[in-house]
Image (cartoon, helix red, strand yellow):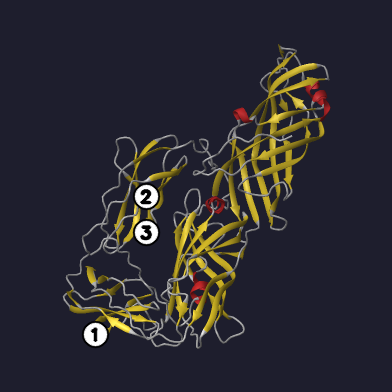
C-alpha cells in the first residue's frame, strides 16, 4: 500500500465529530444536493472573528474553511447526490486566549457550536436558514502561544431543484465551551460557558456556485482497491476517478452489492464523498470478500473498478509502524515546557497520534506529551527551569504501532516563575487556582512632601495568590499573601533639611483579598478592590551619613489598613494586571531607638498622619508555564 495514504473516517450526521466552532453551520450551509464540478472545489476561505471570552474579553479567532464536497458547479435532484456534505475547517486560537484558558487551569477544551448559515439556492428569493449544534471535540490547550482546532462534520443535504446561481453565507456564531483541568475536573467556570462571536471584517460568503442542468458523461474507472486489515477493520484506498463535472461519491461493493455502514443509524453505505479515495469497513475474521469501488458523478453516472479478492485474517492489529517523524524544531520555550514542530509521519492505515519524549542528562527518555490527530506539532511539558533536555518525537497509528524515535533536538529551558510561586497553603478552600504576581509602586509621605518606593523592583518579592472565577464570567475572588516582607531603600529630607536614608519593610498581617467585577463595555475592564493589613518597619537608618540607632523594632504601632481600588480604565486585563491606588493613614511608630533613646516622636512627627496616597502597579498572574514572570516598574 502507498505509505502516503491518510484515511478519513466519515462520521454519520448524528456524530458531527467537529473540533471547530463553524463545523455545524458550514455543514448545513453546504448541504446542497448535487455534486462537484470539474473546476474543482472552491478554495478554502479564512474568516476573522472576535469572540468574547470570560475574564479576558474580546479576542480574535480565525477560521480556515474548506468544503471538499461543494464544487463550483452542481447538478440538481439526482438519486446519487450525497445524503451528507462534509467540511474541513481549522480554527486558530490566539496566544492571549491560550493564556486566559491556562489562567483557569484548563488543559483541554470541548463543547458545541451554535451556528446559523444562509443558503441561497436558485428559485428562492430568500436564503434558507440552516441551524446546527455540532460537538467541539476535545483539544489539548498548549502552555503558551496559539493553537489549532480542527473541524470535520456533515449534515443531511437539502436539494436544489433548478438551474441558476447560489451562495452560502455564515450569519451568526456562538460557542458553548467546556474546559477541563489536567485531572479531568471542571474549572471555575463550571460545566460550560457561552461565548458570542462576531465576524470582524470581510465578506461572510463561504462559497458561490452554479447549478447546471445535466451531466451525461460517466467518470473514468477508479483504481483497483488496496486493502489492509487491522483487527476487525479493513482500510481501503484506490486511485481516483476523473469526471467532467466531478465525483460525488465512492461506494464500496462486495460481490457487486453496496455494504451497509453499521456506524450510521441513518442507513448510510460504506464509502466516501467528493475526492476522498480512502475509507474503512468492518470485516469478520476468516470471511472472504470480493471488493470493488464504484464512482458516482453529478448526473448519477457511475463506473466500477476491477474487484480485489480479500480474505480477512485473525482479529489482530496490523504490524506496520508509521514512518519516522522528521527532526523536531523548537518553536518556543518556557521554564517548564518546549513547543515543537516536525515533519509528518506516514502510515498505511493512518497516523493516530504523536508522542513527545524528554531526556535529562544521561537518563531515559520520558513521555512528556501525547497529541491525538495528525498535526505535526506539540510540546514537552513538566520540565524544570534552567535545565538542558534532549527531545524526541514518535508517531503511533490506529493499531497502536509506534514509529522509531525522531532525530533528537536539544533545548535549554528558561527561567520560570520564582521559587514558591503559588505556594499558599492557608488560602480559602474555594479558591483552588494558584499563581503569583509582582507588585511595585510609590507611597507618598505627606509630611515630608516626598514618596518612597514600595517593593523595590531590583530586589522585588513576589506575592502568592489563590483565586476563583465565578461561573458567570463576571467576578474574580482572590486572596494574596506576600512570599516575604516587601523591602525598599528610601531617601527623604527629614524636616526639609536633613538627608535621611533607611530600609522600609512592609510585613503582611493575615491574608489580603482582591475582588474584581468585569465590565465588558468600552473595551472591557475591572472594578478592582484590594484590601490588606501591613506593619511598616524601618531599619538601617542614616541621617547626614551617620547611623541612627533606631533598633530592630521601629515599626508602626498597629497594622496599616490598606485599601486600593482600580477602575476598568485602569485595570483592563486580568492577564496584564493594572494600577491600583488609594489613601492610607500611617499610625504612630513605636519601638524606635531602643531603651536608651526614644525616637518614636521623631518618626511620628515626620511620617505619621492621614491621607497618604499610594499607587501600586500589579503585574500579570504568573503560572508554572509563564515565560516572562518579572518584577514590574512603579509608575508615579
In screen coordinates, is 216 left or right of 426? left
Q: Nearer the viewer, residue 82 or 527?
A: 82
Q: Position of residue 190 (x, y in %)?
A: 55, 61
Marks 1,2: beta carbons within 8 A? no
Q: Can you say whether 635 is above or below 204 in the image? A: above
Task: State the CA–CA distance, disc 3 to disc 1.
Answer: 34 Å
Q: Could you say which disc has been placed on residue 3 in the image?
A: none
Q: Can you say whether 457 is above or below 601 in the image? A: below
Q: Position of residue 567 (x, y in %)?
A: 74, 49
Marks 3,1: beta carbons within 8 A? no
Mark 2, residue position: 342
Task: State the CA–CA distance, disc 3 to disc 2.
Answer: 11 Å
Q: Nearer the viewer, residue 347 or 575?
A: 347
- Marked residue nearer the N-terminal end (3 or 1): 1
Q: Can you say whether 541 is above or below 215 in the image? A: above
Residue at 60% x, 28% y is 459
Residue at 22% x, 69% y is 229
In screen coordinates, is 456 left or right of 602? left
In screen coordinates, is 465 left or right of 150? right
- Marked residue nearer the N-terminal end (1 or 2): 1
Q: Residues within 10 Å of mark 2 (few under 14, many from 20)?
A: some
Mark 3, residue position: 374
Q: Secondary structure at mark 3?
A: loop
- Report the quarter where the N terminus lies: bottom left
- Marked residue nearer the N-terminal end (3 or 2): 2
Q: Nearer the viewer, residue 427 or 265?
A: 265
Closer to us: mark 3 or mark 1?
A: 1
Q: Position of residue 354 (x, y in %)?
A: 35, 54
Q: Can you say whether 404 is above or below 298 in the image? A: above
Residue at 45% x, 83% y is 75
Mark 1, residue position: 256
Amino acid at each position: 500500500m502507498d505509505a502516503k495514504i491518510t484515511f478519513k473516517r466519515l462520521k454519520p450526521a448524528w456524530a458531527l465529530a467537529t473540533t471547530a466552532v463553524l463545523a455545524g453551520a458550514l455543514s448545513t450551509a453546504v448541504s446542497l444536493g448535487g455534486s462537484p464540478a470539474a473546476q474543482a472545489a472552491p478554495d478554502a476561505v479564512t474568516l476573522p472573528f472576535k469572540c468574547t471570552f470570560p475574564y479576558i474579553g474580546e479576542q480574535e479567532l480565525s477560521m480556515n474553511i474548506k468544503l471538499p464536497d461543494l464544487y463550483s458547479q452542481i447538478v440538481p435532484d439526482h438519486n446519487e447526490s450525497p445524503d451528507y456534505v462534509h467540511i474541513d475547517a481549522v480554527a486558530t486560537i490566539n496566544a492571549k486566549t491560550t493564556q486566559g484558558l491556562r489562567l483557569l487551569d484548563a488543559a483541554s477544551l470541548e463543547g458545541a457550536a451554535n451556528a446559523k448559515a444562509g443558503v441561497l439556492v436558485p428559485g428562492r428569493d430568500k436564503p434558507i436558514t440552516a441551524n446546527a449544534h455540532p460537538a467541539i471535540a476535545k483539544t489539548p490547550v498548549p502552555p503558551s502561544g496559539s493553537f489549532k482546532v480542527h473541524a470535520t462534520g456533515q449534515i443531511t443535504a437539502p436539494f436544489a431543484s433548478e438551474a441558476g446561481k447560489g451562495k452560502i453565507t455564515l450569519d451568526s456564531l456562538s460557542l458553548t465551551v467546556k474546559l477541563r483541568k489536567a485531572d479531568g475536573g471542571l474549572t471555575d467556570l463550571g460545566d460550560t460557558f457561552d461565548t458570542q462571536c462576531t465576524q470582524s471584517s470581510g465578506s461572510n460568503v463561504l462559497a458561490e456556485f452554479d447549478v447546471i442542468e445535466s451531466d451525461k458523461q460517466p467518470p473514468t474507472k477508479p483504481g483497483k482497491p488496496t486493502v489492509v486489515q487491522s483487527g476487525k477493520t479493513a482500510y481501503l484506498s484506490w486511485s481516483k476517478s476523473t469526471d467532467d463535472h466531478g465525483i460525488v461519491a465512492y461506494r464500496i461493493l462486495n460481490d457487486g452489492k453496496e455494504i451497509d455502514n453499521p456506524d450510521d443509524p441513518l442507513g448510510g453505505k460504506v464509502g466516501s464523498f467528493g475526492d476522498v479515495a480512502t475509507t474503512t469497513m468492518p470485516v469478520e475474521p476468516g470471511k472472504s470478500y470480493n471488493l470493488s469501488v464504484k464512482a458516482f458523478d453529478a448526473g448519477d453516472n457511475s463506473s466500477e473498478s476491477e474487484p480485489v479478492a480479500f480474505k480477512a485474517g485473525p482479529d489482530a492489529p496490523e504490524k506496520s509502524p508509521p514512518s519516522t517523524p522528521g527532526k523536531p524544531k523548537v518553536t518556543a520555550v518556557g521554564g517548564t515546557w518546549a513547543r515543537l514542530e516536525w515533519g509528518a509521519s506516514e502510515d498505511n492505515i493512518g497516523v493516530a497520534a504523536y508522542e513527545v519524549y524528554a531526556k535529562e542528562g544521561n537518563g531515559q527518555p520520558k513521555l512528556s506529551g501525547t497529541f491525538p490527530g495528525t498535526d505535526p506539532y506539540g510540546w514537552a511539558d513538566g520540565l524544570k527551569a534552567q535545565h538542558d533536555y534532549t527531545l524526541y518525537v514518535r508517531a503511533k497509528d490506529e493499531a497502536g504501532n509506534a514509529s522509531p524515535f525522531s532525530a533528537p533536538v536539544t533545548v535549554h529551558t528558561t527561567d520560570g516563575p520564582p521559587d514558591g510561586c503559588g505556594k499558599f497553603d492557608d488560602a480559602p478552600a474555594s479558591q483552588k487556582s494558584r499563581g503569583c504576581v509582582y507588585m511595585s509602586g510609590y507611597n507618598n509621605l505627606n509630611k515630608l512632601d516626598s514618596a518612597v518606593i514600595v517593593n523595590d523592583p531590583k530586589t522585588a518579592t513576589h506575592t502568592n495568590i489563590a483565586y476563583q472565577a465565578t461561573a458567570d464570567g463576571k467576578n474574580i475572588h482572590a486572596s494574596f499573601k506576600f512570599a516575604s516582607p516587601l523591602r525598599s531603600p528610601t531617601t527623604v529630607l527629614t524636616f526639609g533639611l536633613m538627608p535621611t536614608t533607611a530600609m522600609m519593610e512592609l510585613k503582611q498581617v493575615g491574608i489580603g483579598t482582591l475582588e474584581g467585577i468585569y465590565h465588558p463595555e468600552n473595551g472591557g475592564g475591572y472594578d478592582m478592590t484590594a484590601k490588606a493589613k501591613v506593619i511598616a518597619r524601618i531599619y538601617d537608618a542614616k541621617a547626614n551619613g551617620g547611623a541612627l540607632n533606631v533598633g530592630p523594632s521601629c515599626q508602626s504601632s498597629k497594622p496599616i489598613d490598606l485599601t486600593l481600588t482600580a477602575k476598568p480604565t485602569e485595570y483592563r486585563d486580568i492577564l496584564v494586571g493594572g494600577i491600583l491606588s488609594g489613601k492610607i493613614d500611617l499610625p504612630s511608630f513605636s519601638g524606635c531607638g531602643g531603651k536608651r533613646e526614644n525616637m518614636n516622636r521623631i518618626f511620628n512627627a515626620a511620617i505619621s498622619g492621614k491621607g497618604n496616597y499610594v499607587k501600586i502597579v500589579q503585574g500579570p498572574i504568573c503560572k508554572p508555564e509563564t515565560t516572562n514572570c518579572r518584577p514590574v516598574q512603579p509608575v508615579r
